[in-house]
Image: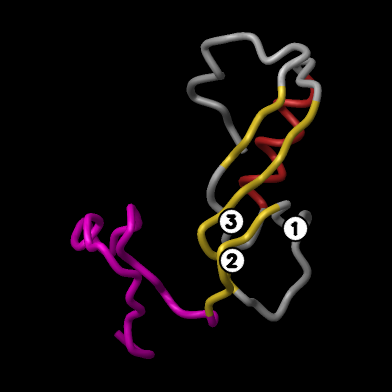
Amino acid sequence: MEWRVAPAESVKDRVVLDDILDEGETMASIRDRIMATGAKKFLSAVLCEKLINKSKPLRPDFCGFEVLDRYVFGCGMDTKGYWRNLPTIRALTEGT
């Protein structure tokens, strides 16, 4: 992962909480970078975790619920730039 913008403030001796987990590669890279800058602890809290058929480099510390391996949107997640602000989480039908 290439960082285009590093965290603006120092995280040395602080607890860092992140928010989204899909396959876990990006969050693992963020965790490694945050811990390397001196954070006291890294926690991940996700609204939902996608159930996929491969191992992940980390598991969330806190998870609202699990979703099947489908493209989900709403509650801050979009699909092709649409439906980010839906008050519910929806999934695309397979093949769309």
Foreground residue among 47 and 53: 47
Q: State which tag comes first along the sequence, 2 or 1.
A: 2
Question: For the residue carrying disc 3, how many other residues have a C-alpha within 10 Å: few (<14), some (14-19), or many (20+)?
Answer: many
| Residue ID at (80%, 22%) | 40
Look at 72% across and 27% down and name the residue there: 33
Q: Is the C-beta separation of discs 2 and 1 under 8 Å?
A: yes
Residue for badge 2: 49
Mark 2 surroundings within 10 Å by alpha-carbon count, few (fewer than 14), some (14 through 19), many (20 or more): many
Please tell me how crowded label 1 is: few (under 14), some (14-19), or many (20+) other residues with Cα within 10 Å.
Answer: some
Residue type at mark 3?
A: Leu
Which residue is farthest bottom? Answer: 94
Quarter location, residue 38: top right
**Label 3 vs label 2: CA separation?**
6 Å
Tell whether position 73 is magenta.
Answer: yes
Name the spot of residue 84 as percent of width and height, x first. Answer: 25, 56
* Residue on which the image places disc 3: 21
In the picture, measured across the screen, residue 50 lies left or right of residue 62, that is left
Tell me how the rendering is colored: secondary structure
Give the number of the disc on residue 59: 1
Q: What residue is shown at x 59% (from left), y 66% (from top)?
A: 49
**Placement of 7 over or under 72, stated as above or below:** above
> Quadrant of the rendered structure where residue 93 is?
bottom left
User: Which range of residues does the magenta coloring cover?
Assistant: 68-96
Tag 3 and tag 2, C-beta contact below 8 Å: yes
Residue in the foreground of this view, choosing between 41 and 78:
41
Q: How many marks?
A: 3
Q: Residue furthest left?
A: 82
Contact check, label 3 and label 1, Cβ < 8 Å: no
Cα–Cα gap, marks 2 and 1:
9 Å
